[in-house]
Amino acid sequence: MAFRALLDLCKRRGFLYQSAEIYGGLRGAYDYGPLGVELKKNILNSWWQRHVYLRDDVVGLDTSILTPHPVLKASGHVDEFTDLLVDCILTKERFRPDKAPTLTLSKDGTKIPVEAPDKATAKAWQQLMEEQIAPGILTTLEGKKVMLHVNAFVQPDEQGRGGRIDFRSKSGENSIPLDYHGYVEPNSNSPFLTASRPFNLMFKTFLDPIDPIDKVIQTTVEHDDKTQTVREAVDQVLKPSTVYLRPETAQGVFINFEQVTRTMNKRPPFGIAQAGKSFRNEIRLEHGIFRTPEFEQLELEYFIPPWESSHWFKYWREQRYRWWLEHACHKENFRQRDHGKNEMAHYATGCTDVEYLYPWGWGEVEGVAHRGNYDLTQHIKNSNAAFEVVEDEVHVTPHADTCLVPTKKPARYVPHVIESSCGLNRAMLAYLCDAFHQVSEGNNKPPRSILRLHPRLAPVKCAILPLTGKPEFMPIAESVAKSLRRRGWFTMVESQKLKIGKRYYRHDEIGTPWCVTVDYQSLEDGTVTVRDRDTANQERMHWRDVQQFIGDKLMEDED
């Protein structure tokens, strides 16, 4: 219920809109409203400030979204950037098996409840199962549920092998066997699934003045080469013009490694930061902006000598977790989780996720990975790029792994990479969930909502509230607003005729940390009242001091 209330608030107050809503919307696509774009920008600015402006060993980069085929072929994305895909034969739903739940049995363990959206659908599913999917299977209807009667059930091993369900038949003679790999269709608990198959997640397009469909048709019609399939012939014709919407920002950093080191005079250890959009053709879109085909990443690729990689992996693991906790109301809802060996990419030697406890469970918001020298090495092999670092003198620090320090001079090595990859959309959703509070007003009134966002993340830093709509209050109100806007803080002047208390509550709801009230005393001595969102405490000060007051508050817990 609280999550639904948060989503309603986001739409009602201008954080999130359904994209193309007047045309029925687009699945998984969202537009960020006036407050949403400010919140997202403030999260990005906090990240950039911490990892670029406050350091002398990190520089920024902004690379192209359109990525040529050779880049992603070298990185392995063309061949290996896939998720497994499974279809449900009964419901026709498509899903990822690694995100799907395990089978649910009835309390006595003798039936499998398959839940339909309504009774009519349940009856149609029952007929489909008995006549086509598993002919002769014994089923019963219980409202919206189709109960599948089971003789025996065997759990699969950790790799999903050896599992089996033996269904009872109507005749009662022979069981009807079904392989079970450890998961079912998420919405219905249906075990009737296709075999899993790989699905490439990248969006492909073409840079060519000629419509690629024309080439496809022409190649298909003219194909007579028995040594290759029609699909292979089409791929060959389209390959020169094939480009992809980048699935991650990292590859743009790696292919610019030599140019950055040369133009900025950088040597490892140093980092390259990039914020930008990436695109993945996700099989399952879920939980609002948590999983969408278009998303923004905040990525840092930190290049280090191989003998210092363990130290820097630990360092960035700690630094990134600290950043998340600094902006959190409920620190206990954030955690770090180390990947098991079966979860990591083949080239990674370590990976730690930062996770947030969303209303539906723990979800990843960032990954910190030790990628080794895989990426740079792959691009060296495929392009002969000059990514090798040559040093006359090797600087050995106290935390170096001495067995990896080169003994030959000059020393030659391909840098290792520690990657921090944060999803900006997921960060925004996590901090909204973390900040959302509902406060009871008593007297059978509905609870009111407060967004206790960290002040540096809050979309509106300050609201200026003239006590009434009388014009004599406006000069001071405008003067306060002007002084704050000069500092780059989003400031609103609220001159509606609503009572001052209701206007306070309206700004509590969108997370505004401070409200400044201009009243009759302000006309006499120039003082105003500053109200704090979280404590409701009020302080009286001259309007010229408001700017310094808010500036000090914003920097209170900044390192």
Image (spheres, rainbow, N blue to C red):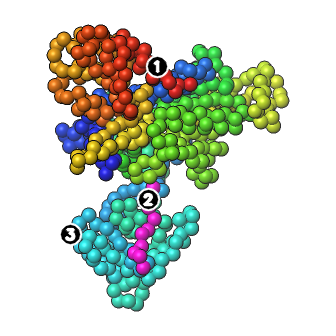
Q: Which mark is residue 508?
A: none
Q: Is residue 29 visible?
A: yes
Residue on which disc 3 sits: 120
Residue at the spot of label 2: 100
The magenta span reads 99-108
> For this rendering, which residue is in front, 545 or 422?
545
Q: In what element is the residue under mark 2?
A: loop
User: Which quarter of the image is occupied by the C terminus?
Assistant: top right
User: What amino acid is labelled 3 in the image?
Assistant: Ala
Residue type at mark 2 is Ala
Q: Residue at x 60, y 48 (%)?
A: 338
Circle 1 is placed at which residue position?
552
Mark 2 touches mark 1? (CB < 8 Å): no
Location of residue 528 in the rendering, given as x and y in whole percent from the top left corner: 31, 17
State the residue at coordinates (32%, 61%).
Answer: 92
Instruction: Measuring from the top left, give residue 326's x and y in whole percent.
Output: 51, 33
